[in-house]
Amino acid sequence: MKRFIILLLLSAFLSATDEVRAAYAAGNDSLGGRAARIEKGHFLPMKRRIDREINKIKSVYKGEVMIGLTASYGTIKADDTEMMLILDDINLKGSMATIKPFVGYAYRDNNVVGLRFGYENIDGELGNIALDLGEQNDLSFSMDGMSMSSSSYSWSIFHRSYMGLDQKGRIGFFAEWELMARTGTMTFSYMNGDEKKYSHSRNTGFKLNFNPGMAVYIFPNVCTTVSFGLGGLYYNKIDQSDETGEHTGRRTKSGLRLKFNIADINIGMVVHLWNKKKN
């Protein structure tokens, strides 16, 4: 009887082993079939599965040469200040103007590299300003006869990536990275008693800027652009001297600055010299 039970258990074990082997073989066949289906194209490759086709709409075509110009101009006067409650007798005026011609080449659809030259001029004059915090605070002072004049030149290389919004590519956004070198001079004058003093400085700097913007085609070969400076990495060096030219000091500063700059809004016009959209 015991021998019969042992034989029965051994037979059941061998039967179960055969079933496990069959299931394992079937699994291998299933994996092999899945691999075969992938090779036959039943499943999309990973590259195609994550491609969202954001470059499908073309705003700029490969081979196009772009010539453009961006400019900005702004003024400030005493009437623009919001601190009239504590500042009295303000005589302030100033202006800032920039002009930046550039040329670019589309090395592939919606991607442009280029060179840009820039000139900036800033003038400001503070005829008089007085601060009065009241008799209880016992703090008041006034300044007058100050003026500042600055001019600078810049050279930069940039890369733009466009993204079209409509099927005809008439409206689109672009993201621009710009590596810029800049040099310029600034003159600051102030009254010291009855004598006017001057201070001169030479500025040298490098910047890596991020400038997003929008492009709208008003003609097939002409578009207008609006871009906004959001800052980036920067390095500045300032050498200061007095009116006799004697060196009086030096200051350097570097860091990361990311913020919207209302003084760095540029409106431009771009002409495309070779337009493949006509072909």
Image: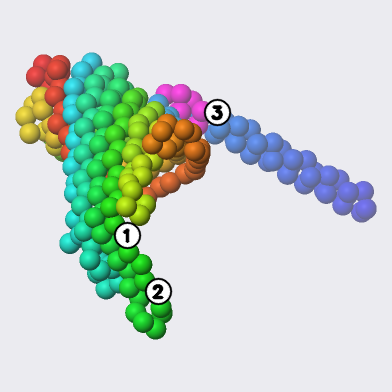
Q: Residue furthest left?
A: 219
Mark 3 surroundings: few (<14), some (14-19) or many (≥20) residues within 10 A: few
What kind of element bears circle 3? helix
Rate crowding at label 2 as few (under 14), some (14 to 19) or many (20 or more) other CA atoms within 10 Å: few
Location of mark 3 (residue)? 32
Locate the N terminus by quadrant.
Answer: bottom right
User: Is-magenta flag for residue 35?
Assistant: yes
Q: Which of 75 and 206 lies nearest the eye of the viewer?
A: 75
Residue range in magenta is 34-40
* Mark 1 in CB contact with mark 2 (< 8 angstroms): no
Q: Residue at position x 93%, y 53% from top?
A: 2
- Depth order, front residue of 150/215: 150
Residue that extends furthest to the right in the rendered view of this protein: 2
Q: Residues within 10 Å of mark 1 (few under 14, many from 20)?
A: some
Along the viewing direction, whichever of 277 and 36 lies nearer the viewer: 277
Q: CA distance from mark 1 to mark 2?
A: 14 Å
The disc, 3 or 1, on the residue closer to the chain's N-terminal end is 3
Measured as percent of width and height from the top left, residue 111 is found at 29, 26
**Label 1 sits on residue:** 143
Where residue 264 sits in the image (x, y, percent)?
Answer: 27, 43
Residue 260: where, in percent of width, then height? 32, 50
Outermost residue to the bottom: 136
Please name the colour scheme applied to the rendered image: rainbow
Q: Mark 3 belongs to which amino acid?
A: Gly
Identify which amino acid the numbered label 1 is placed on: Met
Who's the residue at 56% across and 32% down the image? Answer: 31
**Residue behind mark 2:** 139
Q: Residue 145: horizontal and vertical position, in percent?
A: 28, 52
